[in-house]
Structures are given as structure tokens and as C-alpha cells.
Amino acid sequence: MLLTKEDNRRNFLRLASGAALCGRSLSRGQSGVPPASPPDVSLRLGRISWEVAPGKIVKTTGVNGSSPGPLVRLKEGQQVTIEVSNETGAPDLIHWHGLHIPSAVDGAMEEGSLMIDPHTSRQYSFVAQPSGTRWYHTHTMAGRDLRRATYSGEFGFLSIDPRSEPGVYDQEHFLAFREWDPYMTNGAEGDSSMNVAYKYCSVNSHALGFGEPVRVKQGQRVLFRMLNASATSHRRVAFAGHRFRVVALDGNPVAAPQETEILELGAAERIDAWVEMNQPGVWILGATNDRDREQGLGIVVEYANQNGPPRWVTPSNVRWDYRIFGSAQPHSSSQAVRVPLVFEKKWAGNRWVDYWTINGKSYPKTDPILVKTNETYRLIFDNRSDEAHPVHLHRHTFELVEVEGAATSGVRKDVVVVGPRQKMEVEFKAANPGPTLFHCHQQMHMDYGFMTLLKYV
Ligand SMILES: [Cu+2]
């Protein structure tokens, strides 16, 4: 999806006119029933196949014939109706990730959103908020069926433009980091539990060097809106010859924008970063891990009038730390109700998938987190496992307030990676009544117990 702002607008308009046609055809034959108002956007889930890399065909399910699906571009505060039709052959539904919307349309069955039966459609109507880089994805369960859930290609960007457009960039590109053709494997280093590996990687729908490059001109400021759309993998990303200026995490502007050499994204995390194009050449923006990059996880950035093979420069080993984007001023919220959440792994046995627990219990037996409207809560994450967990809270935005004992503020997110054996604290205001899912976004962790519900009482 390498589009300039103008292209995006055109793309969105095309989408909207297609949607209107679809809405009319649906009301046909229902005499006596007033036709539903036509949706603003129509998304069709169905089988797709395409050449991700030379000679490598991926077969999966996607949206409107591709993966990622179309960019859905909305205006903050806009009332929108999105129709999703399901031609995947199995019950499905779509979650609008990072939005503050009612449980019934959030797109998680655990919250009460309805499944879309095969060969039927459903409309999701909501007010688009808050502004920022959001995304949509299927929210089904996969278990060991790696054709399902976030292993599939059923996702796309959802970008909500702020009421006041800051737009101080020359180009905007949406980049989704992805893997394809998942398969079950034994974990590494004597760990005999089952895990997931992949055959190919891509940025958007093509492997490194196979799709269209990002074409830039010297002196341009280019905004990259990046998403780790992986079901299970954590990513470190660099742009050879350049540095990123990180301006937003999970779509939310950070207190202290910073220049960085490396970006790190857990599953479902987003980073908005500018790059000043001041190193003419042909370069690779991609995974720092050589094997992942060789499998396709990267994209070529080509300056005008430059040619030759794209260059990669091995970056330093600098550590990723959310706190550099925050303010050192501690968050002043002594009123927050503390909610301790301990994450542990239960080894299930050789060639079995491990179970995950929150405070000793696996979903659906986990204890719900009870909240009162307009009170502030501090979730205290205590990861007692050796794996990182990108934990996600639906329908709310939280603020990081403590990372490994150090206070911070001004970094607002909806997914945060709690590192191995790490402690982290976040706060949020319970201001969106309705059942709310909290879970690890690593699909295999989520499917095997790492989930609970937050309930307004
Ligand atoms: Cu996890």
C-alpha cells in the first residue's frame, strides 16, 4: 500500500462508491422491509491467493481480494457504517483495533459482538475515535488451525485523521510487517513445546525486492505508519542509512518525539515515524534479523535518479525502551485502583501447546477485572515467564506509568510488550462502559488461556 496522501483519498473514494452499490443490491427482494442505509465502507472476507515472492504463491483468506485489505480512512468523530460480508466458509468477525467504540460493534465475541455466519454480512456502525493509526483484523480463535484468526490475511489499516490535520510531511506510507505460510514446529533450545514458524515474510503484500519500492526525493520528509501484523512474532526494524523520528506509538502522539536507529514492534503494535530523506541511494527498510529479511521482511526505498542493488547496513544492538518517548515526570494518580496481574506459563507436555494463566487461571476461568465508570485503574503486569507478551486492552487507551520500577508518563498505547520477567504498570480511565477484552495479542498465547474480561459493575 504505497500511496501518497492524494492516492489514499482517491482509494477511499473508490471504496465508498463501491460500498454504495453493494448496499443497494442487499435490499433487493426484501419487499416491505425499508432498505438499510448503504454502508460507507464494504469489506468482503474471502479466499485469496497471490505471488508474495517470485514463484511463491500464498493461499489464505483476505479482504476485498488482497492482504492487507484496503486502507479504511476515516475522519475523527465521523459516524461510519462498515459492512463486512463473510465468504471465508467459517464464522468470522472483524475487530476495530484501538477504537473507543461500544462492545456490540468492537468485534470480539467475548464482549458480545455477534459472529458473521458464512455467506452473510453484518454492519458495524460507530463514531470513529480516537484519531491515529488503527487497524482492523479478524478476532476468531485458531488453536492449531493455522489458516484461521490472525494467521490469515484478514486485516488492514484503519487510519483516523484528526479534526485538525497536522500533515507536515511530503509523503505518507502504510507498511505492514507480515509472515505467511505458518506451520507448527518444536520450540528451540531444548524447549519441546509447540510453536509457530513461517515460510515467507513481506512488507504489505510482497517480499523484499519483489514489490514496488517506496520512491522518494532528496529533501522530502516521509511519514511511515508501521504495523506489526504478525500473529505471533516480535519485530526489530531499521532503515539503512537513515534514522527514524518516532512521533506516535499505537497511533497516539508521544510526549517526547525521538530519533532512533531501531524500532521494535510486538504483535499488533504500531509506530508512526518520519524520516528526512537526506542520503541519496537505494536502501532497505526491514527486519534487523538477517533470516527474516532474507525471507522477505523488508522494502526497498529508492531515491529519484538513483540505481543499483539496495543496500543494507547492519545496525547497532541498541535496546528499545518506551520510556525515551515519555516524560520523566511521574504520573500523578494516587487515586488509581491497583489491579495486580501475574502472567505465567503452564507447560502442557512434549509436543503440546503450553497454557497461559493470568493470576493462576486460564480463560474462560480467569477472574474478570471489575471496574466502575470514570474511575482510574492501574494494571500491574508481572510477567513471570521467559517470553515477551504484547498485551492488549480493547476499547480503551492506557498510559505507561512505570517500567521496571522507573516512573514515566505521556506514552499512551493499546498494546504494550511486557518483556520476559519484566514488570510494567499502566493506567486507564474506565470511561467506555461495556464488556472489554484484555488479552495477549500473540495468537497462540491468547488461544491457550491468556485472556480475561474487564466488566463494568
Ligand atoms: Cu503472550
Image (cartoon, rainbow, N blue to C red):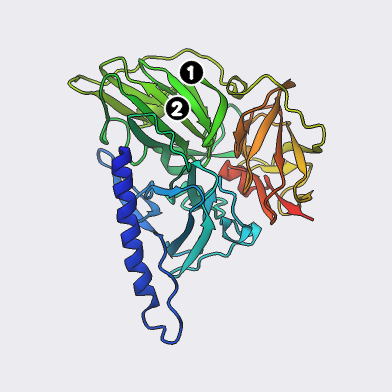
Looking at the image, is 286 positioned above or below residue 100?
A: above
Residue 359 shown left or right of residue 293 in the figure: right
Looking at the image, is 454 positioned above or below residue 170?
A: below
Query: Could you tell me how many numbered marks the image carries?
Result: 2
Residue drawn at the location 79% of the way across and 50% of the way down: 372
Q: Are marks 1 and 2 in contact (CB under 8 Å)?
A: yes
Q: Report x, y in % for residue 347.
A: 70, 39
Of residues 94 and 233, the one drawn nearer to the viewer in this rendering:
94
Of residues 238 and 387, the one drawn nearer to the viewer in this rendering:
238
Secondary element under disc 2, as helix, strand or loop, is strand
Three-letter code for the amino acid on which mark 1 is drawn: Thr
> In the figure, residue 191 lies in which quadrant?
top right
Three-letter code for the amino acid on which mark 2 is drawn: Ala
Estimate the spatial distance between the alpha carbons at disc 1 and disc 2, rounded to whole Å.
9 Å
Residue drawn at the location 40% of the way across and 33% of the way down: 167
- Which circle marks residue 30 in the picture? none
Residue highlighted by disc 2: 273
Q: Residue furthest top?
A: 316
Residue 207 shown left or right of residue 121 in the figure: left
Q: Report x, y in % for residue 243.
A: 42, 17
Residue highlighted by disc 1: 260
Ligand 1 sits in quadrant = top right
Cβ of mark 1 under 8 Å from ligand 1: the answer is no
Q: Report x, y in % for residue 28.
A: 36, 79
Q: Residue furthest front?
A: 164
- The local crowd at label 1, few if under 14, some if 14 to 19, many if 20 or more residues have their Cα within 10 Å, is some
Residue drawn at the location 46% of the way across and 17% of the way down: 261
> In the figure, residue 393 lies in which quadrant?
top right
